[in-house]
Image (cartoon, rainbow, N blue to C red):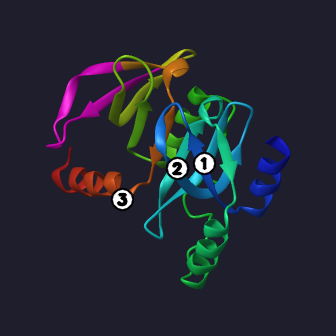
Amino acid sequence: MSHTLSTLLKSRRLVSIRRQDIDGYGIQGFLVGLSDNLLALEYVYDFQIDGLMVLRRSDITEVRRTATDEFQERLLKKEGIRPGSQTPVSLELDDWGTLIRQLSEHCPLMILERELGPSPEFAIGRPVRATAAQVEFQSFSGTGKWWSKIERLKYSQLTCLQVNTRYLGFYQRYFERSGA
């Protein structure tokens, strides 16, 4: 898988990713970053790039470039949609802490997910502090109210991080207008 991944990374190709133990659905995106532990892609949904998604490599069961990926990549490029708009110059994918610190300088809001275990967790908000083993994270509700309690999310349990999504963009504009 590594040789194929590094080749796909260099060419920034549209790929399909499966995480069999987490999700029955595939994820499609342009591969834009890779380390021993993490894989970054510009997530493609309904023929649009919908932010940067970083996945834990140990959860990935398959990375393929299908005929559908090839065809849809040609359509996207004809529409002017190409990879490269979602990431800082060079992603620091050494570990979750390093990446979260880097992205928090560029992206005011992020989504962190712990998709495995007895109680899957979806946290949306902003990192307060990234330590060696966990991130202290301030979340907000669906009504745009910041929770006073700081969550502590262990890196060992994180499976997915997202920034620059359309979903986050709506909340970011709301917070900018409301001064929150």
Mark 1 to mark 2 CA distance (whole Å): 5 Å
Camera-nearest residue between 83 and 72: 72
- The residue tagged with tag 2: helix, strand or loop? strand
Residue 139: within the magenta? yes
Q: Residue furthest toward the right?
A: 3
The amino acid at mark 1 is Ile
Q: Earlier in the sequence, mark 3 or mark 1?
A: 1
The amino acid at mark 3 is Arg
List x then y, in percent, for residue 136. Answer: 40, 21
Q: Is 85 rendered above or below residue 103?
A: below
Q: Is 177 rendered above or below residue 142?
A: below
Classed neighbour count for the residue bearing mark 2: other residues with Cα under 10 Å, few (<14), some (14–19), many (≥20): few
| Quarter location, residue 54 | top right
Name the residue at 53% across, 21% down.
Answer: 155
Number of numbered discs visible in the structure rendering: 3
Name the residue at 62% across, 37% down.
Answer: 60
Tag 1–tag 2 contact (CB < 8 Å): yes
